[in-house]
Image (tube, grey):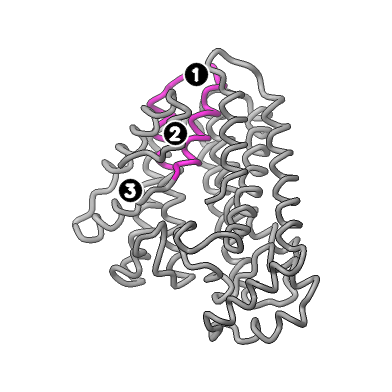
């Protein structure tokens, strides 16, 4: 797999990210070779590897510099992330992910469930082999619980016209931000940092994750399907109302109701009408303002981190600014 071009700006991370991918590849050994290939294709499908990169960077703060362990933990986190994506695609009945057919589209839902479950098991096998304490396993299991809770919350809120901004933030805190928090926190903890310091790293990761998901949701309303690698407003048809739409509902619910009331029967023209109404309100600007708030929190947290010889703090600030001002 060829790394995303963004990593050219972080040459010291490139070897470890390549080793992370290699370890993931080695961990996927299935008797069903067609499914094995589909899982490997998912791993190779162009993900940015942000979560393992944050784990690797935060692991540079500790006094226990075991890079092999850091790479194994990075692989475990990315496998957990990939498993959640596969399961997401089943729930959302998604056919496209990262511009490629999803596993459920290539095979069926049952196969996709097993593929996601296999990656979850692979994640925990690596964690069991390389984490030094039960504390890390506890953090991982609690993070998985929070991720599932966020997914269930989002499912419970489907087609809810009165969904609130607090509901949305609670859901994405689990669904997306928790894995960023885990990446940053466990990177620090497993490299020998104190629990207090690791908790601060987790808080930075949580703010990064919140801003990241809000920006991702804004892109649904500002980019073409080709630009973001999935159909625009597909989430709306599935009943998942993200931040721009929630803000628009607060401003002009009556204009949106005739279209949203059709739920899964919304046509392409209906989706375009929703798109246009959202743009006629201040919803996108308000969403951008909230993303900027969490970005600022994350960057202020990073600025308080200690200096070291490999310029971890500077690299974290640069990376965070880059992904939280992205356009795809």
Q: Counting other residues with Cα less than 10 Å from the Cα at mark 3, is it few (<14), some (14-19), or many (20 or more)?
A: some
Left/right of residue 174 with respect to residue 106 in the rendered view: right
Residue 213, compared with residue 299, is above or below; it is: below
Q: Which residue is mark 3?
A: 44
Between 12 and 277, the one nearer to me in the picture: 277
Q: SS for tag 1?
A: loop
Residue 247 image-quadrant placement? bottom right
Magenta-colored stretch includes residue 316? no
Which mark lies nearer to you, 3 or 2?
2
Q: Residue at x 65, y 49 (%)?
A: 210
Q: Residue at x 43, y 25 (%)?
A: 11
Residue 229, compared with residue 26, is above or below; it is: below
Which mark lies nearer to you, 2 or 1?
2
Name the dominant secondary structure of the magenta segment: helix
Residue 140 percent coordinates (x, y): 52, 44
Earlier sequence position, callout 1 versus callout 3: 3
Figure disc tally: 3
Residue 16 percent coordinates (x, y): 39, 29
Q: Counting other residues with Cα less than 10 Å from the Cα at mark 1, is it few (<14), some (14-19), or many (20 or more)?
A: some
Q: Which mark is residue 64?
A: 1
Q: SS for tag 3?
A: loop
Q: Counting other residues with Cα less than 10 Å from the Cα at mark 2, is it few (<14), some (14-19), or many (20 or more)?
A: some
Magenta-colored stretch includes residue 65? yes
Between 96 and 88, the one nearer to me in the picture: 96
Earlier sequence position, callout 2 versus callout 1: 2
Magenta residue span: 48-76
Q: Which residue is mark 2?
A: 7
Q: SS for tag 2?
A: helix
């Amino acid at each position: 797999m060829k790394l995303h071009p963004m990593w050219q700006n972080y040459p010291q991370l490139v070897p470890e990210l390549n080793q992370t991918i290699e370890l993931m590849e080695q961990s996927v050994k299935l008797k069903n070779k067609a499914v094995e290939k589909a899982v490997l294709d998912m791993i190779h499908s162009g993900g940015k590897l942000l979560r393992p990169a944050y784990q690797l960077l935060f692991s540079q703060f500790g006094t226990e510099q075991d890079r092999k362990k850091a790479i194994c933990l990075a692989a475990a986190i990315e496998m957990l992330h990939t498993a959640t994506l596969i399961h997401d695609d089943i729930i959302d009945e998604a056919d496209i992910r990262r511009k490629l057919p999803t596993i459920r589209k290539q095979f069926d839902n049952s196969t996709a469930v097993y593929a996601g479950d296999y990656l979850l098991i692979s994640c925990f096998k690596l964690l069991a082999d390389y984490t030094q304490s039960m504390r890390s396993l506890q953090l991982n299991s609690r993070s998985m619980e929070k991720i599932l809770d966020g997914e269930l919350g989002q499912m419970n809120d489907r087609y809810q016209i009165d969904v609130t901004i607090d509901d949305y933030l609670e859901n994405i805190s689990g669904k997306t931000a928790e894995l960023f928090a885990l990446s940053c926190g466990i990177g620090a903890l497993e490299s020998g940092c104190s629990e207090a310091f690791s908790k601060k790293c987790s808080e930075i990761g949580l703010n990064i994750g919140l801003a990241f998901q809000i920006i991702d949701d804004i892109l649904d309303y500002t980019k073409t399907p080709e630009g973001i690698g999935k159909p625009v407003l597909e989430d709306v048809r599935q009943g998942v109302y993200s931040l721009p739409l929630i803000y628009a509902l607060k401003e002009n619910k009556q204009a949106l109701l005739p279209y949203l009331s059709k739920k899964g029967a919304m046509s392409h023209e209906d989706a375009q009408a929703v798109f246009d109404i959202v743009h006629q309100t201040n919803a996108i600007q308000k969403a951008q303002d909230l993303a900027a708030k969490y970005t600022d929190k994350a960057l202020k947290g990073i600025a308080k981190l200690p200096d070291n010889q490999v310029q971890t703090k500077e690299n974290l600030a640069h990376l965070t600014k880059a992904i939280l001002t992205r356009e795809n």
